[in-house]
Amino acid sequence: MASWSLETSASPGGAIAIFRVSGEDHRDLDRAAVALGFGSVATGSVLLRDLPGPGGSVADRGLVARPNATTLLLMPHAGRAVRDAVTAGLEDAGLVRAAGVDAIAAFPEAVDVYEARALLAMTRTQSPRAVEVLLQHAELWRDRDVVAPISRSVQGSMRLAPRSGDRGSEVDHQLQHLLIAPTVAAVGRANVGKSTLLNALAGQTIATVADEPGTTRDHLGVTLVLDGLAVQWIDTPGVRPDAGAVEAEAAEIAAEVIARADLVVGLEEAGRGELPVSVAGRTPDVRVASKADLADAVPAWADAAVSAKAGDGLGQLAALIRRRLIPDEALTAATDESCEPWRFWT
């Protein structure tokens, strides 16, 4: 039976994702190519094809390459929604996910399987904070299973302490953000300063900034590191009632991104009224008063106040966003003797 694996990082950052489809022999791969809707794909060829999504839908238009008799490479765009759709399409076609990389084989210098797994996880993360946390939890696993020799297979039968209770599951989910960059969507009316804030947080010009409303007409995604946590920051088009057809279509597309975001940052000028109750059906998780240097005081509704042009409040906002995604207690959970270890390799 043919299998598949994701060869590129699960965290955002690249433009193209690469899925590998592997067959036991050329006939097995031929059957997989037909099941995926590609028909006959000759060895050595590179084709532009519709890539399958869930339920017979099209996930994306991308390249399909067959470098050898038993391998297909599918190359869609790297956005999370596209990757998820291609994953569902592969599974609907009857392909199974291949076993993960053997951490010990990849890192034979590791002292045990837990350190090997931590080192492997570090190769997949863009978050500086992940390093210390991974090593701490690897140590916890080592303490719980003192007879895990380096020769034991990653797939072997280890004594893995189960997570107990909702709290353990919640911490696991929060720490997973260290390995897969969460999506943060910035929302607000036109000309409120979203693009200026993005450029200030990035330390370089990413988005076009102008006083003319409607300058940002498409949502723009970029990976930022905020207080040691890598996030996929989405700068969405400004909300305004007199938007034209192009802006309205862009806003409709952005609404889907906002609905799926892990965290929504809502902006309004410090000198104006309170934020709308919701944007695209989402209540902002973090409310930011922008252009604070032009206001007499920080409004009571704001969780944070920034002046992107002056650089004021950026560090505090970055820390606040990180804490909303991964609270301090989750980062330090490994220092609690009663902590159940984070199974970071799953």
Image (cartoon, rainbow, N blue to C red):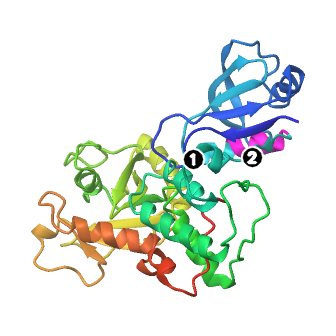
Image coordinates for residue 188, horizontal then vertical, percent: 35, 62
Q: Amino acid at mark 2?
A: Ala
Give the quarter of the figure containing the N terminus. top right
Q: Is residue 239 above or below residue 41?
A: below
Q: Position of residue 332 (x, y in %)?
A: 45, 78
Please provide the residue range marked out in magenta. Answer: 86-93
At horizontal 84% and vertical 38% (from top left) the residue drawn is 93
Residue furthest bottom in the image:
338
Q: Is residue 78 above or below residue 226?
A: above
Viewer-nearest residue: 294 or 31: 31
Where does residue 284 sit, x and y in percent of width and height? Answer: 43, 71
Q: Residue at x 60, y 76 (%)?
A: 143
SS for callout 2? loop
Q: In this image, 308 relative to 118: left or right?
A: left
Picture disc at residue 267: none
The residue tagged 1 is 107
Q: Regarding mark 1 in the picture, which secondary structure is present there?
A: loop
Residue with the mark numbered 2: 99
Q: Quadrant of residue 105?
A: top right
Which picture quadrant has residue 241? bottom left
The structure residue drawn at horizontal position 71% and vertical position 44%, both measured from the top left corner, is: 87
Q: Is residue 242 visible?
A: no
The answer to whether residue 154 is left or right of residue 34 is left
Q: Amino acid at mark 1?
A: Phe
Q: Is residue 289 magenta?
A: no
Question: Residue 195, image x and y in percent?
Answer: 28, 51
Q: Main secondary structure of the magenta part?
A: helix
Residue 139 visible in the current orientation: yes
Q: Label 1: how many residues lie within 10 Å, few (<14), some (14-19) or many (20+)? A: some
